[in-house]
Image: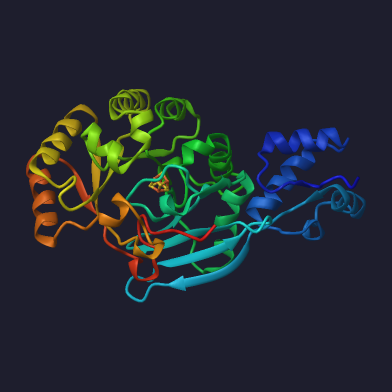
Amino acid sequence: MKESKINLKGLTLTELENFFEEINEEKFRAKQMFNWLYHHKVDSFRKITTFTKTLKDRLNKIATIESLKLLDEQTSDNSKTIKYLFECSDGAKIESVLIPEANRLTLCISTQVGCPLDCKFCATGQMGYKRNLSTGEIIDQYLQISRVISEPITNIVYMGMGEPFLNYSNVINSMNIFSSELAFGISGKRVTVSTVGIPDKIKTFAQEPFRGKLAFSLHSVDEQIRSKIMPINKKFPFKQNIDALEYFYKSTKRKITFEYTLLKGINDQESDIKGIVKLSKRIPCKVNIIPFNSIAHTNPSGIAATLKPTSKEEFDFFVERLRSNNVTVFVRNTQGDDIEGACGQLAIKL
Ligand code: SF4
């Protein structure tokens, strides 16, 4: 039987050291390989000028450098947001979104093919779930997009398809590679991971040496409403998550970002404002208020089909009421909605 080759893209420095040790090559080759893979972005052993021909031939026989295939890119007319469609080596498809802002260029990356969590306001949740992405596939979204753009990517947000903390070890490995000076040298201050709330993973993340930022998909402070629009809340109630978030802040002194999509008649009432104000007094935070972006392209059913955005007047009123109660609020715009690349809109037929 033909042995499958090992994909070196996505291996951490320690994993590469183990690999070179196992094949009886010098350990320092791991550092060189790491640097060539991520800093020089090579996609073939042939291009590694510091390796001998013998070593390159050997690697070609036992290893590969797998890449995502860029199938399509769509640029938003009104915001210059770009949505990229990739194919993985098993044919699975994922999307990433590049968001230009005043002083930064943010890449929103996916961590799963689809998502199993079925949040009712999210297009990815409506498409179902296939599998976790490997560390290499997470990193490669950055590598492939860096190749086709002229400006450097300054920030990374783990907010594309999937729940990052359901793919914890691959996500953490990718963060460690992003932050390594031998690879991309991206500081934790410029990396945000967004979760719907897996309490034990929030606590573990607080202990990681990589000092990334944490965003929490809040969307309601009411357990019942949250369970209705985010079924995962039945398994991990909001109360457990508040404890974990408090732990995160106390351990790291990093403020939490709460994400809150305003849904007409569901989470845009006076009681919701009071709940957010109370929460912000307990946990140092900022709150991103997000307009609901249509998920009609996924042909939603059940509750998902009934969701509507809060009117402009009520949206502004909600934001104003929070601000007047000393909550730090940012309003996310609908950047990229014309290409279904705005917040909560990513979806592909599985
Ligand atoms: S919001 Fe995040 S966790 Fe929820 S369904 Fe969408 S991708 Fe999954």
Residue at horizontal 43 percent and vertical 58 percent from the top: 346
Residue 72 position, x and y percent, is: 55, 71
Residue 78 as seen in the image, left or right of residue 125: left
Identify whether 274 is placed above or below 153: above
Residue 329 position, x and y percent, is: 19, 47
Disc tally is 0
Res 182 seen here: no
| Closer to us: 39 or 125 | 125
Residue at horizontal 73 percent and vertical 53 percent from the top: 65
Res 317 seen here: yes
Residue 196 position, x and y percent, is: 37, 39
| Closer to us: 348 or 211 | 348
Instruction: Tell me the quarter of the picture where residue 66 sits.
Output: bottom right
Residue 349 as seen in the image, left or right of residue 332: right
Query: Which quadrant holds the C terminus?
Result: bottom right
Identify whether 26 is placed above or below 127: above
Residue 47 as seen in the image, left or right of residue 302: right
Residue 261 position, x and y percent, is: 26, 50
Instruction: Tell me the quarter of the picture where residue 307 sits.
Output: bottom left
Query: Which quadrant holds the N terminus?
Result: top right
Residue at horizontal 44 percent and vertical 62 percent from the top: 98
| Closer to us: 9 or 263 | 263
Residue at horizontal 36 percent and vertical 27 percent from the top: 248
Instruction: Tell me the quarter of the picture where residue 27 sits.
Output: top right
- Pick out the residue farthest to the front: 302
Q: How is the image coloured?
A: rainbow
Identify whether 111 is placed above or below 283: below
